[in-house]
Amino acid sequence: EAGVAQSPRYKIIEKRQSVAFWCNPISGHATLYWYQQILGQGPKLLIQFQNNGVVDDSQLPKDRFSAERLKGVDSTLKIQPAKLEDSAVYLCASSSYSGGQYNEQFFGPGTRLTVL
Amino acid sequence: GEDVEQSLFLSVREGDSSVINCTYTDSSSTYLYWYKQEPGAGLQLLTYIFSNMDMKQDQRLTVLLNKKDKHLSLRIADTQTGDSAIYFCAESKGYNKLIFGAGTRLAVHP
C-alpha cells in the first residue's frame, strides 16, 4: 500500500513570496490533515478535512494560509505572502473513517520550507 | 491550555531500558499516542493506549497511563542504536485532532 505522498520535499523562498504544497493521501482515506512543525516543537494541526469539507481550521492563519481538497482526494496548502516565521516542516497525514470512528493517522515525509 | 509536556532529552546506554515521560492536559482524551520521528522522515505511530487502560505492552514497548495525574510513559526495553530518534507524546481531542508535545530526543550510546 502506497503511503502519503507530499511534494516538494524542500522549498526555499524569500519573504512575501507565495508557495504551495501538495499532498496525496492513502487511497480511500476520507480524512486529511495538514500539520506545521517548527524546529524544536511538535506538530501543530493547521486544518483537517473530511472528504472535501473542513472539520477544523481553528489554528490556520487565514490571512495568509489557505487549503483546499476540491475532489476529496489530494490537497494543496498555500501560503501567500510568506513570513520568516513560516519556516517549518509541513506534514500531511491521512486516516480512514469507519463506524463513526477516526482511525490511525499516517504521515507523509513532509515539506521543509525555508523563508529567507 | 493545550500543552502536552515532555522532557527534551534522554541519553541511555545500548541494552539498557529507556523511559520517556509525558504529562497531558485533557482528562477526556480518548486515546494517547507515542510517535517516533527519525531524521528527515515523517512521524511513525509506535503505539497507543485507550484512556480506560493503565498499561499496554507491545514487544519491547510498555506504555503506562496514570489518569489521575495525567501522566503517560513509554518504556523501551533493551534499547538499541536504531531506537535513536525523537519521540512524541500526543493526545487526541475533538475530531481526532492530535496535540503533540515538543518531543524527547533519545540518544543511545555504546
Image: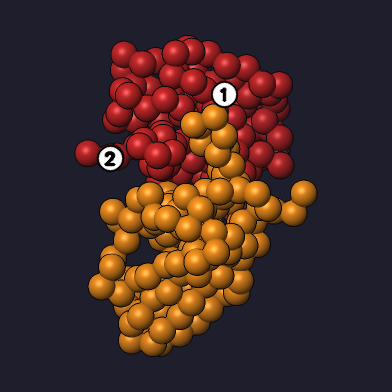
Chain colours: A orange, B red
Q: Is residue A114 visible?
A: no
**Label 2: which secondary element:** loop
In this figure, which residue is indicated by the disc labeled 2? B2
Q: Is residue A72 above or below residue B23?
A: below
Mark nearer the viewer, 1 or 2: 2
The percent coordinates of residue A20 (x first, y second) are 48, 77
Above or below A82: residue B110:
above
Q: Residue furthest left?
A: B1
Residue picked out by circle 1: B75
Left/right of residue A9 with respect to residue A86 in the rendered view: right
In the picture, the quarter occupied by the N terminus of chain B is top left
Front-most of residues A34 and B88: A34
Between the residue at mark 1 and the residue at mark 2, the CA separation in whole angstroms equals: 24 Å
Q: Is residue A77 left or right of residue A6?
A: left
Q: Which mark is residue A76?
A: none
Residue B25 seen in render: yes
User: Quarter of the image containing the C terminus of chain B?
Assistant: top right
Q: Name the residue at 37% across, 27% down.
A: B29
Task: Name which residue lies at 33% across and 86% down.
Answer: A16
Mark 1 residue element: strand
Marked residue nearer the N-terminal end (1 or 2):
2
User: Which amino acid, mark 2?
Assistant: Glu
Residue B24 lies in quadrant: top left
Depth check: A62 or A10 in front? Answer: A62
